[in-house]
Image (cartoon, coloured by chain):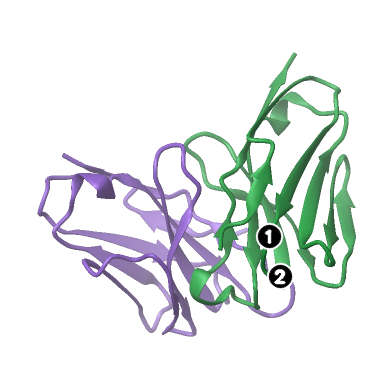
């Protein structure tokens, strides 16, 4: 079952913060986050495994609440290069099972100077 | 570092024709995935292979088939093409040991006229 992402779109000014949410009705093994620019391949950002953890590098971090089956991606002090569509991908078991890594519908992030 | 290589980058076919897309995964990656992404849509899982054996099957039409060869490259064969098959087709590979992100190729843009 497809995870639900929110919001659908965000417009920010450079330097502002953003939070993108991803929730699932199924018990998850892992949550992946990817960023995709128009016409390009999705680029891996980070992966979180069940057990509830938070990961981050530089100004992008994420958390996974196993009880709620929710993950959030945090973008702080956004830069122009952060623009793109952010997808969460969820696995119910290692390798994804019959659904593979199932992506949400994406969140379009636009950063304005 | 070596990345996932897909060929061709662009392909134009007519309705009812056949197409073959190729994917060369990152060396030593044991799992290959195929995804279809329509315009403005999220990537949809088609099929995956683990160690050259079909692993999981998603929303792949019966007109499509795929296989992975002894050198680990994979091919997606598409027959009786329809206008609705026009999309970006991504191949991704991963190393299933531990936390394993998907590394995507640059995709093949298929246009069916």
Viewer-proximal residue among A81 and A28: A28
Which residue is depicted at the point 86% across and 22% down? A15
| Chain B color in figure | purple
Per the image, label 1 sits on a secondary structure element best described as loop
Residue A85 locus on image (x, y percent): 61, 37
Viewer-proximal residue among B38 and A7: A7
Is residue A57 depicted above or below B46 in this figure? above
Look at discs 1 and 2 and give the one toward the viewer.
1
Residue A41 locus on image (x, y percent): 52, 46
Q: How many numbered marks appear?
A: 2
Screen quadrant of the C terminus of chain A: top right
Residue B55 seen in render: yes
Near mark 2 (Cα within 10 A), the count class, few <14, some 14-19 or many ≥20, is many
Q: In whole angstroms, how far apart are the C-alphas of marks 1 and 2?
A: 8 Å
| Chain A color in figure | green
The reply, left or right, for residue B96 in relation to residue B4 is right
Tell me whether circle 1 and circle 2 mark residues in contact (CB < 8 Å). Answer: yes
Residue A17 locus on image (x, y percent): 85, 30
Is residue B11 depicted above or below A91 in this figure? above
State the residue position of label 2: A28
Residue A49 locus on image (x, y percent): 79, 69
State the residue position of label 1: A24
- Judged from this view, the residue extending furthest toward the top is A113
Q: Are marks 1 and 2 on the same chain?
A: yes
Q: Chain of mark 1?
A: A
The reply, left or right, for residue B102 in relation to residue A29 is left
Which residue is depicted at the point 49% across and 75% down? A98
Which residue is depicted at the point 51% across and 41% down? A40
Which of the 4 quarters of the picture holds residue A1? bottom right
Per the image, label 2 sits on a secondary structure element best described as loop
Residue B10 seen in render: no
């Amino acid at each position: 079952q497809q995870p639900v992402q929110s919001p659908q779109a965000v417009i920010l000014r450079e330097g502002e913060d953003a939070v993108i949410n991803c929730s699932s009705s199924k018990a998850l093994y892992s949550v992946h986050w990817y960023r995709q620019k128009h016409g390009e391949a999705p680029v891996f950002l980070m992966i979180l495994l069940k057990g509830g953890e938070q990961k981050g590098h530089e100004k992008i971090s994420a958390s996974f609440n196993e009880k709620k089956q929710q993950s959030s991606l945090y973008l702080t002090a956004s830069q122009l290069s952060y623009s793109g569509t952010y997808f969460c991908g969820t696995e119910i078991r290692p390798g994804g099972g019959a659904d593979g890594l199932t992506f949400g519908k994406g969140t379009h992030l636009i950063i304005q100077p | 570092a070596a990345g996932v290589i897909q060929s061709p980058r662009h392909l134009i076919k007519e309705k009812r024709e056949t197409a073959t897309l190729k994917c060369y995964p990152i060396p030593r990656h044991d799992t290959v995935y195929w995804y279809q992404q329509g315009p403005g849509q999220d990537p949809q899982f088609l099929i995956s292979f683990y160690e050259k054996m079909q692993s999981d099957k998603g929303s792949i039409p019966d007109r499509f088939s795929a296989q992975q060869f002894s050198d680990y490259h994979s091919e997606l064969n598409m027959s009786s093409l329809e206008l609705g098959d026009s999309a970006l087709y991504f191949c991704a590979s991963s190393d299933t040991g531990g936390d394993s992100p998907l590394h995507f190729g640059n995709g093949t843009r298929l246009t069916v006229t």
